[in-house]
Image (tube, rainbow, N blue to C red):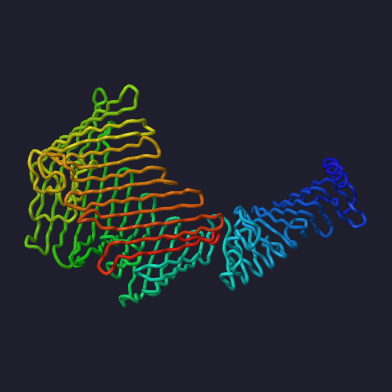
Amino acid sequence: MTRLTALFCSLLLLWQPASWAQDLPFTLSADDVRYNLKENVVNATGDVDIIGNDHRLRANNIIFNPETDDLTATGDVTFMLPDGTILFVESIDLNGEFKSGIIEALRLRLGPTGARMTAARAERKADGRMVFTNAKYTPCTDTCSNDSELPWYVQAAEITYTPSTSALHYDDPQLVAFGRGLVKLPWFSHTIGPRQGRSGLLPPRFGSSGNHGLEVETAYYYHKADNEDVTLRARAMSERGLMLKGQHRLQGEHWRSEINGSMIDDDQSGDFRSHVDINSVYVLQPGRRVGFTGAALSDETYLDDFFNETPAYLGRTAYAEDASAEHYVVAQATHYQDLRNGADNNETAQVLPQVQAERVVQLGERGSQLRLFGDAQALHRDEGARTQRLIGQASYHKPIELAHGQRVEVEAKLRTDAYHLDGTTDDGWTGRVLPQVSIDWQKPMISPNGRHLVTPRAQLVLSPRGGTPDEIPNDDSVAYELDVTNLFNSNRFAGLDRVETGPRFIYGVDQRWGSAEQEKARLFVGQSIQWFNDADLPELGGTGTKSSDWVALLRLRPNKNLSLSQQVRLDNADLVTRRADTNITVGDTETNYFQTTYSYLDAGPSELTLRGQFSPHPKWQYYAEMRRDLTDGGKQLLLHHELKYTHNCYRAGIAVRRRGFRNRTVPPATDILFNVDLLTFGNSDY
């Protein structure tokens, strides 16, 4: 009997007065469909296909009793659940709505991940849960079916699968790798769906270090809600003891917070050591927020000793911000912890507090603006100078469009500062008044084919010479370095305590090759000329003479697999290199590449970094990095090698890291870290 004939006969049967002739709870098609009046059952054979209640069942034979709502399917049965889970069995007993039933000797593929499970028996509950007896689970789908050849699987007396949460719950489970039992637990749970959080153990990490000894780190992840979680870690080190670490993350409609911390009773030093890092913000309304960010350590080398981090300072800042397109206001207070060798925190300046405000007023339709800026700051030291300052500045900015594409920007500023000093030989009030006018001109010129853009630029800055009394301290403008990014700034000091004064002329030429979508090359060269020597400018910053050093930028990107970028500062007299920053990348940083980074500062540090990644196969990835200090004969700072293998159900990696310098009590050391992630169980990083 053809399928079309069977469907026609099925429709005719629905007109019969038999009790089953009411609407079926599913749609049915098969090669042959018959109704047994005596037993009141429907028999369908030959490529049976049933669809109902978001489920689908295919089999060679089915028997359905409309009165008892019992359905039995046999012969190459395939049963698909709403979440994508597919069961492969020889026979299955269900009710007509597929809500419950019993299955014998089954194989199944779970959800969108395609993970596999086998069981001697399974029962489907009315709430959709499935309970498997004497079951085995593995996500290894591209390996042999022989259990002894599987990379890993979990076997348990009973496994419960909840499709609504894609969660598996194990009773009396055991982890088996390549046929050998490894770990046995009384209870275990995890999810198999992508990006779903669920409480449970995370994979352990193993390692060996010349500084820490043998170590193992285990972790427990607590998924409190979709917007909040907690991770607790225990790091046991044979030479240092047990370290406890914790992380709490919260993301609300208006609130975001992350807290990290750790602590250890260090066996080596005999001291209790710890750290905490907090980053929290609360949005009161769009453009207005309050927050706190900062970290604190028990001692200066804690982060370097256990986390390979060497910051010079740690700050703790509480702040409140209000911003819009026309204004910005911030009030903040910051307490610094100085981690430099030999630093005295009693002499470290603490910002308690600082308030800054900026307002932009649009004047007409041609882009003219009035900009108002104010700063109030108090610096406190337990020992040394304490400073309070008030700064107010008004500036008028006007762009002017001239013929042939020329653009001129005129800016006039008036700044007044008041400083109060305490704890110095010059206690009391002092101040300064700083007027300034600048005129900036540039004319872009493009080649006929549109592939070459040349932009000459010149700027004239006029202001009185001097103007900074000797009594004004320099707390936030210590760093000064002339480069491409700040050449045309009216004040090239990073902070507010120091200001460039006196007339000067700045000029440069910017050339670009390529299109707007793909820049192939760029070359910029520029210089600054002062009428007088400015005593506030440092000798080594690039403007120690009236004619500054030359600054230049070269950037090449002939194709997507090759890029070069170099910034240099050359002596204005003999073109000797005073500063150089070079980066060369060959290849695709997502797969295979090699990168060289070189930095050099005259009479300062010089460092070379090499890093690269090689992926000979999609499953294999090798990464290496080397950092070397080139000053004083050279010193190896870091040597790192890492090899990863990614299977469809696990990821394994080994990393070897050599740290080649001493930081006070932290000696050079070699670390070997080994990590295995059983995919669908969670993951961890080095």
Q: Position of residue 189 (x, y in %)?
A: 58, 66
Question: For this view, does 111 lie left or right of residue 472?
Answer: right
Percent x, y of residue 49 = 77, 48
Quadrant of the frame with the N terminus: top right
Residue ranking furthest to the right:
38
Left or right: residue 534 versus residue 592 is left
- In this rendering, the answer to whether 140 lies above or below 523 is below
| Towards the viewer: 545 or 7 | 545
Number of numbered discs present?
A: 0
Q: Position of residue 61 (x, y in %)?
A: 82, 53
Question: Residue 264: percent from the left, percent from the top?
Answer: 36, 73
Is 118 on the left-hand or right-hand side of 622? Answer: right
Q: Residue at x 39, y 33 (%)?
A: 517
Above or below — where is 213 with respect to 582?
Answer: below
Screen quadrant of the C terminus: bottom left
Q: Identify the residue shown where x is 38% and y is 53%.
A: 624
Residue at point 43% right, 49% down? 614
Q: In this view of the protein, which residue sits in the foreground, 427 or 286?
A: 427
Q: Quadrant of residue 680?
A: bottom right
Q: Residue at x 20, y 56 (%)?
A: 632
